[in-house]
Structures are given as structure tokens and as C-alpha cells.
Image: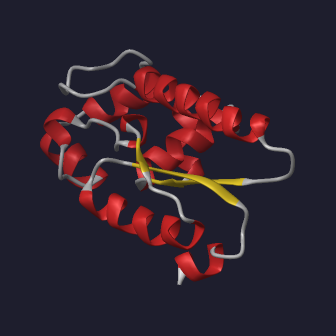
Amino acid sequence: VLAEWLASEPVVAVLCSPLLRSTVTAELIARPHGLVPQIDTDLSDIDRGDWSGLTIHETRAHFPGQFESWCTDLEYTDHGGESFEQARYRAQMLLQRVQKYAATAEHDVAVVLVTHLTRIACILSHVMDKDQAGWMEVV
């Protein structure tokens, strides 16, 4: 359905996370435009380290205080994963590359990003200038 909806849009690039579910979705979106999806590691989900595979509720139960520390300390990496600042930096670098696609176009164009919920929240928090404590409001 999404690929059909985007088929009439002026899509000039489809960027995706390296995970299979993202690349498959990206291929479906890119095909009507004659494009090949570009894998971009900055679209990878946030590295959760020890929390990988856990919900926020489970993380709080198994690692008391760590999630709260991650939400308040820009450089917190005691969980063995990515800090909020590192995640936002990746979002910033990604958006700079996306802007380059738009800057070279002679008219309005679309660049499609196929990624994960927490990566989307991180990108939006950067765009909306949300601080670390407010990033979850975006989701």
C-alpha cells in the first residue's frame, strides 16, 4: 500500500536501514521509480547494547535506573550501547545527506527513509530540537 501511494510522488532516492525488513520494504518503494535502495547505516536502529530485544518496561525491570540515566545523561553508555548524543549525531549526519538530494533537484522531490521507530523518534527529536528528556514525546 505504501509503495502504491508513493508511486506517484517524485521520489529521487530511497535510503534504508541494513536490516532485511527495511531493505525489502525499500525495494518495493524504489521499484516504481526505477531506483535501487541505498543502504545507510545511519538508519540502523539505536544500538541498545544490553537492552537489545527488551521493551522499555523490561529494560527498567532488568536494569533498574539505567534507562532513566540514559534519558538524562547525554553521554550515558553503561548499557554497552549508543548514547543519546551519538544517536542524535547520526540523525544529523543523515539529514545533511538527505538535504543534498533536495538541493540538487530543480523541483520538489521526495527522499524516502525506511527505518525503525526509535531511529524515527531520534530524527524527529533532532528536527524538532527536543532535548534528551523530551525525545520520547515524539513517538
Residue 12 vs residue 23, the one in the foreground: 12
Asked if residue 11 is positioned above or below residue 40 in the image, the reply reads: below
Q: In this view, does 12 lie above or below 134?
A: below
Q: Taking 90 as reference, is 107 left or right?
A: right
* Picture coordinates of residue 36, whole percent (x, y): 45, 56
Q: In this view, does 105 lie to the left or right of 85?
A: right
Across and down, in percent, residue 68 comes to 36, 33
The x and y percentages for residue 15 are 48, 49
Outermost residue toward the right in this view: 107
Front residue of 134/24: it is 24
Locate residue 7: give its quadrant: bottom right
Residue 108's spot in the image, x, y percent?
Answer: 83, 53
Q: Can you tell which quarter of the image residue 73 is in?
A: top left
In this rendering, position of residue 41 left or right of residue 99: left
The residue sitting at 41% across, 65% down in the picture is 27
Residue shown at the point (59%, 50%) measured from the top left: 138
Residue at image x 56%, y 73%? 32
Viewed as shown, does residue 119 lie left or right of 67? Answer: right
Q: Is residue 11 above or below residue 48?
A: below
How many marks overall?
A: 0
Q: Residue furthest front?
A: 34
Taking the spot 42% from the left edge, 31% from the top edge, the residue there is 71
**Nearer to the camera, 87 or 79:** 87
**Color theme of the render:** secondary structure
Q: Quadrant of residue 106?
A: top right
